[in-house]
Image: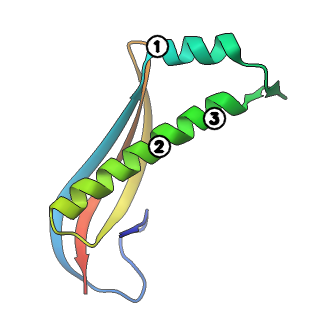
């Protein structure tokens, strides 16, 4: 499946729009506490462990979005946007886009 932040895919024509698809992943407060309690790899103000956990959440959100697009019969997701929000001491990573069929 093609996933892109652009509104179209070069060399392909969008033949059907299936609607908006979203995927989310939430990191709970205990994840932050555990990460900060055990961080020993902070160099220059960056934490490899924290960045790794954020990367994992982003991957989960994108995979969930792709799965929902496939269920709708889509072959691509265009206009993808990634958002990061803090809600009640939890971090939510949200991926959203438009599920389409390419011709």
Q: Residue at x 61, y 37 (%)?
A: 52
Is label 2 in a helix, a strand or a loop? helix
| 73 w.r.t. 82: above or below | below
Q: Residue at x 24, y 64 (%)?
A: 99
In contact (CB < 8 Å): disc 3 and disc 2: no
Residue 84 is left or right of residue 43, and the answer is left
Q: Which residue, given by chain and number where applicable, does mark 3 sit on?
A: 51
> Quadrant location of the N terminus?
bottom left
Task: Give the Cα separation between the discs numbered 1 and 3.
Answer: 16 Å
Q: Which residue, given by chain and number where applicable, does mark 1 sit on?
A: 29
Work out whether residue 85 can be spotted: yes
* Label located before the other in sequence (2 or 1): 1
Q: Which color scheme does this rendered protein use? A: rainbow
| 6 w.r.t. 9: above or below | above
Q: Residue furthest right?
A: 44
Work out whether residue 96 can be spotted: no
Task: Give the Cα separation between the discs numbered 2 and 1.
Answer: 17 Å
Q: Position of residue 90 (x, y in %)?
A: 42, 19
| 64 w.r.t. 36: above or below | below
Q: Position of residue 83 (x, y in %)?
A: 42, 40
* Label located before the other in sequence (3 or 2): 3
Residue 51 is left or right of residue 24, and the answer is right
* Label located before the other in sequence (1 or 3): 1
In contact (CB < 8 Å): disc 1 and disc 3: no
Quick one: label 3, few (<14), some, or many (20+) residues within 10 Å?
few
Is label 1 in a helix, a strand or a loop? helix
Q: Which residue, given by chain and number where applicable, does mark 2 sit on?
A: 58
Task: Judge by depth and name the residue closer to the eye, 82 or 27.
Answer: 27
Quick one: label 2, few (<14), some, or many (20+) residues within 10 Å?
many
Task: Say which quarter of the image contains residue 75.
Answer: bottom left
| 78 w.r.t. 29: above or below | below
């Amino acid at each position: 499946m093609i996933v892109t932040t652009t509104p179209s895919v070069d060399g392909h024509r969008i033949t059907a729009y299936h609607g908006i698809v979203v995927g989310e992943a939430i990191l709970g407060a205990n994840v932050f506490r555990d990460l900060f309690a055990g961080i020993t790899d902070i160099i220059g103000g960056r934490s490899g462990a924290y960045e790794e956990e954020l990367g994992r959440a982003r991957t989960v959100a994108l995979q969930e979005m792709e799965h929902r697009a496939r269920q709708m019969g889509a072959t691509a997701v265009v206009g993808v946007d990634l958002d990061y929000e803090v809600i009640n001491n939890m971090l939510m990573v949200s991926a959203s886009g438009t599920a389409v069929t390419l011709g």
